[in-house]
Structures are given as structure tokens and as C-alpha cells.
Image (cartoon, rainbow, N blue to C red):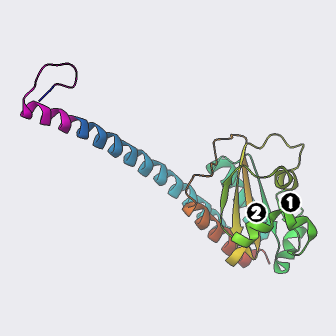
Amino acid sequence: LPHQRGSAAISLVERQVLVLRDKQTVLEKKLHELIENGRANDLIVERVHKLTRRLLRARDAAAVVAGLETSLREDFGASRWVLLATDPALAPLAELRNAHVRVVPRGSPELKIFETFFESARPRSGQIRDTQRDYLFGSDGGPVGSTVLIPLGERAALGLLAIASHDTERYLPTMSTDYLVRIGDIVTEAITARGA
């Protein structure tokens, strides 16, 4: 057989060894990627677990918001976040007077900018429209590089949780949303049990 790097010939056995080495290199790279993904997933599971424990310990709506604040800041590294409640049953959350909680009835004209999000009722990550960013985080609170929008409740009936990062690469549109769905479920249970 002709050698890949010149005109010299090599034996069939030597050629098979070269092919097997190339395959081994590819498999080792894939294995390394799987191990790294597993480690990253373990970290996320641990963070979600901490969030769950904090919210389980909360005895009222104020403690739920405080636990959410601590977890998002310390465990998830969120730069900013907002819980936007749209269900009238969650109106008592407005009494908390917390900058991270906003209660706006679902049919309000100002929520029109989130219409497609509420229709899809699926988590989104990456860049959001300027109008959405300014509505959620204000235009004077510093840069928002990337954002996650998490629906709360069945078909986002309770509202949304918005988490922002200064880092444009932190939340990408290509990232998996499985953990975001779980975070949404956990927060939904906490605010419905203790927020209303």
C-alpha cells in the first residue's frame, strides 16, 4: 500500500495500525468531552439541589425570594434577575416591595413584548430583544450580555423568571434547557405554596 506521506510503500499491517491509532485518538477525544460534560452536569445538579433545599426551608414569600436571590447570585453567578408574576393569585408578592419581583396582570399591554415567549412556554437562552431587556432589567443597571427566560407554571401561566449575565457567552441559544425546566418547576412550586 502507498504510504500517506510519500511514495514509499507500507505493509497492510502497518496501515491498519495507523488507522487504529487515528480511531483511538478520536475516541479518546470523545471520551474526554463526555467526562467534562458529566462534571459540568454534576455541578449543575448540585446547584439545583442547593436551590431546592433553600426554597424548601422558606416559610413565606419573603423567604422564597431571599432564597432565590442567594442561590441565583452565589450558586449560579447571576448578575441580575427578575421574577415577573402574571397570575392574579400571586398579587400578594407585590407587597414584598422587592426590586427582583414584579407583579403584572397577564393581559397588560406592556407584556405584549413577551407574547411569543408565553405562547411557546419554553425556556429561552441567549440574547433577548432590547425592549425585553430594558423592561426586565432597566436601561441604566449595567450591561446585560446574555439572558435566560424560564416559564413559571403550566404553559407559563404564572409568569417568568429572567436571569441575566454580563457575559455574552454565559447563556447561549444552543445550550440545553433541561435544567432550566427543572428550575422553573422548583420555583413554581415554591411561589405557589408560599407566595400566594
Q: Is residue 121 above or below residue 73?
A: below
Rendered location of residue 5, percent (x, y): 22, 21
* First of labels 1, 2 by sequence position: 2
Mark 2 burial class by Cα count in 10 Å: few <14, some 14-19, many 20+: many
Which residue is at a point 19% across and 36% down the rendered structure image?
A: 19
Secondary structure found at label 2: helix
Does residue 87 sit above or below 57 in this rendering? below
Q: Residues within 10 Å of mark 1 (few under 14, many from 20)?
A: some
Distance from Cα at disc 1 to Cα at disc 2: 8 Å
Q: Is residue 11 magenta?
A: yes
Q: Magenta stretch: give its range.
A: 3-21
| Residue at point 18%, 32% (across, down) | 18
Displayed quadrant of residue 70: bottom right
Q: Please tell me which residue lies in front, 139 or 21.
A: 21
Are the residues at dot 1 and dot 2 in contact (C-beta closer than 8 Å)?
yes
Q: Residue at x 90, y 62 (%)?
A: 97
Give residue 65's mark: 2
Give the answer, above or below, for where 73 lies relative to 104: above
Position of 195 compared to 11: left or right? right
- How far across and down, in percent of the image, does residue 66 sit? 75, 59
Disc 1 marks a residue whose amino acid type is: Asn
User: Could you say where residue 15 lies in the image, as x and y percent from the top left?
Assistant: 13, 32
Instruction: Name the residue that disc number 1 marks.
Output: 98
Q: Position of residue 191 (x, y in %)?
A: 73, 72
Quadrant into which the C terminus falls: bottom right
